[in-house]
Amino acid sequence: MGKLNLLVVDDEPGIRSGIKRILESFSVSYPFMDEDFDFEVLEAETGEEAIELLDNYMFDIVLLDNKLPGIQGIEVLEYIKQQAIDVIVVMITSYASLDMAVKATKSGAYDFVPKPFTPKELRSCLENIAKQLFLRRMTQKMQQEGKQIRFQFLSVLSHELKSPINAVEGYLKLMQEKRNGENIVDYTDMINRSLTRIQEMRNLILDLLDFTRIESGKKARNIKPLYLCEIARESIDLVQPISIQKDIDIHLNCNEKISYKADKQELEIIFNNLLSNAVKYNKQGGRIDVNLSKEKGFVTVSVADTGIGMEQTDIEKLFEDFVRIKSEQTKHISGTGLGLSIVKKIADLYGASVQVESKPGEGSNFIIRFPIER
């Protein structure tokens, strides 16, 4: 249960103790809130005491009487405004008037409750305040998380794009200065390396686009029955040029009639990521087995490779955003750290489970089980 710290500022002991009794067993709950709020109450009988407490403690709400011995409540309210103290103030006074309400509102009061008030009136006022505080905290949390995500994006972009751009620029300068001679054939290796680097940058941009579309929930989805063998074959065709270079055999085992209701682009992203990883992290002359099956209320997709594999501790963080497994074997393999994170996010949209079986030096098997009924 959440806790809201409340300060009652009133020179009448009966008012202070009455508010305490009202709030002792009172909590605020709304369907959209992930926790209820109850109240921790402190008291002050003068404006001077209130200011001292406000300087030394964090409060969420102040119930502030205007007519006090010494400095008045409106002066306490002005002090709160001047010091930019983050607290919601409700004025309570026997001398309620429109002029006072306007002045208090201009000085930053959230609400104005005339004495005498009933327990129901006080609870109703605090329910509204608790809702406002909850929404404010949620907004702040989203802003903070948004800043963190933006920072991560900028960090990834600057790091991942800087290296290939520098490499391509270096190759172009060598060609411009004709360091290897006058014949274009002498620069074939540089041209091929530059094209590879450009493809890496393109892959990064596409991964970031997929990631942001899924995170924002703004990607239009077209759910319809799809034949999974067809999508698997298309993805295999896409990675074929790289698999041929590494002499990797890809075997597809599936029933042509296996269908599943899904968005085609989302399934393509899953197959493309799993297959490209199976090629990238495989050994020269390795093998990839793609198995599709349908049984017991699930459609299962399995992509197994004979690659470098990984430790259990690496598997546990594999699907986090911007995470790449770093080792001596992977340091020369390019990637964004977003591919498997995107796979997991899409699988979650279908209520699918993602399982990884892997042993260092023996390979990995990625298994996704899609529920047929969802």
Image (cartoon, rainbow, N blue to C red):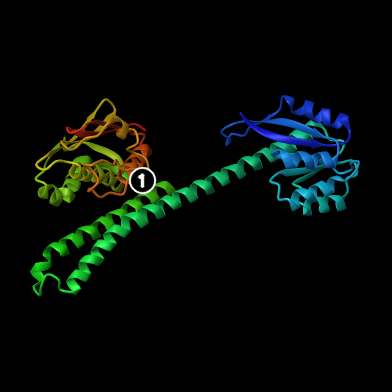
Q: Quadrant of the N terminus?
A: top right
User: Residue at point 26% right, 46% down?
Assistant: 268
Residue 98 spot, x, y in % from top left: 86, 51
User: Residue at point 70% right, 36% down?
Assistant: 127
| Disc 1: which residue | 322
Residue 286 spot, x, y in % from top left: 11, 39
Q: Residue furthest front?
A: 179
Residue 131 lies left or right of residue 158; in this view the side is right
Disc 1 residue type?
Phe
Task: Specify whether residue 219 is in view.
Answer: no
Residue 127 lies left or right of residue 47; in this view the side is left
Q: Which of 187 and 273 lies nearest the eye of the viewer?
A: 187
Q: Quadrant of residue 191?
A: bottom left
Task: Specify whether residue 79 is in view.
Answer: yes
Q: Which of 2 and 32 lies nearest the eye of the viewer?
A: 2
Residue 219 spot, x, y in % from top left: 39, 50
Q: Quadrant of residue 132?
A: top right
Q: Quadrant of residue 261?
A: top left
Count all numbered tags in the image, as a single digit. 1
